Image (cartoon, grey):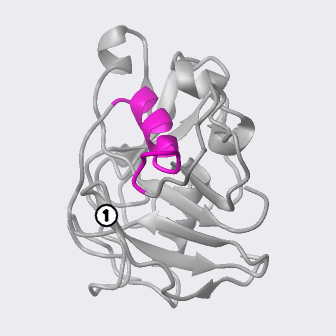
């Protein structure tokens, strides 16, 4: 990774019974936190995750600030130096790559273990974790309306994978070939930690309402800094 990332614990709180937040601080003075504790959390649809995680920063939300609401494109009505959103594939990828670094647990992480091998790490559950990633035709309303910074757009070609999303650069790490299936069609969404390891992925094909409305677990990302 080209940018140096400093790790420190700066934010300590729990969010909607899902995960405790572990923080990362970067040279641009923005603090990012990924939901991370032992509770595997709730399940919900992709559409609801996208909207409800954003609402956590609005008035009445878990970390809500006064006079702040969420627009239809998932932007905020005010600049409050806080940005809470459903994890993107690139954000999941950063966590996965760090887990295999000198700062993490370089052994294969089994279901329910952490990215560091101890309680300070992010708990991993191999249960098909949905991320805010799909194609330009993914049939999910809030995914379509969201501005670009809240989603990753891919094509059905694996060559559209992005640097740092732990797809091509980490392919088959700690897993078997059968655990890696790229986006299956234009109307797809992407699942991580499907099976085998936290590096596995599956391009779920949303070809009917049963799949679109299926519940999956996910995580929230909190970014604190200027300009949000």
**Front-most of residues 200 and 29:** 29
The quadrant the C terminus occupies is bottom right
Q: In the rendered structure, does residue 57 fall within the stretch colored magenta?
A: yes
Can residue 170 be spotted in the picture?
Answer: no
Asked if residue 125 shows in the view, the reply is yes
Along the viewing direction, whichever of 179 and 99 lies nearer the viewer: 99
Q: Position of residue 196 (x, y in %)?
A: 29, 56
Question: Could you say which quadrant of the image residue 5 lies in?
Answer: bottom right
What segment carries the magenta color? Answer: 45-62
Nearest the eye: 46 or 198 = 46
Q: Is residue 117 magenta?
A: no
- Residue 24 horizontal/vertical position (percent): 57, 78
Q: Where residue 161 sits: x, y (%)? A: 67, 46
Q: Residue at 50% across / 45% down in the picture?
A: 59
For residue 181, what is the image quadrant?
top left
Q: Indicate the position of residue 91 as horizontal and vertical percent values.
A: 57, 58
The residue identified by callout 1 is 19
With 165 as the anchor, is 108 left or right in this view?
left
């Amino acid at each position: 990774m080209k940018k140096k990332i400093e790790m420190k614990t700066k934010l300590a709180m729990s969010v909607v019974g899902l995960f405790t937040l572990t923080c990362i601080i970067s040279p641009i003075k923005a603090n990012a936190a990924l939901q991370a504790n032992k509770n595997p959390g709730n399940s919900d649809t992709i559409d609801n995750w996208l909207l409800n995680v954003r609402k956590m920063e609005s008035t009445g939300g878990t970390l809500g600030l006064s006079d702040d609401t969420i627009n239809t494109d998932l932007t905020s009505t005010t600049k409050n130096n806080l940005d809470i959103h459903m994890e993107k594939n690139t954000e999941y990828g950063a966590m996965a790559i760090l887990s295999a670094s000198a700062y993490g647990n370089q052994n294969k992480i089994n279901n329910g273990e952490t990215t560091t091998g101890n309680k300070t790490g992010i708990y991993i559950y191999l249960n098909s974790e949905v991320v805010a990633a799909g194609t330009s035709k993914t049939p999910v309303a809030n995914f379509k309306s969201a501005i670009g910074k809240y989603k990753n757009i891919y094509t059905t070609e694996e060559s559209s994978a992005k640097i740092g999303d732990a797809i091509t650069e980490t392919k088959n790490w700690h897993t078997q070939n059968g655990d890696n299936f790229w986006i299956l069609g234009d109307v797809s969404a992407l699942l991580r930690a499907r099976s085998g390891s936290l590096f596995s992925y599956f391009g779920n094909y949303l070809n009917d309402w049963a799949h679109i409305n299926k519940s999956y677990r996910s995580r929230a990302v909190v970014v604190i800094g200027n300009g949000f």
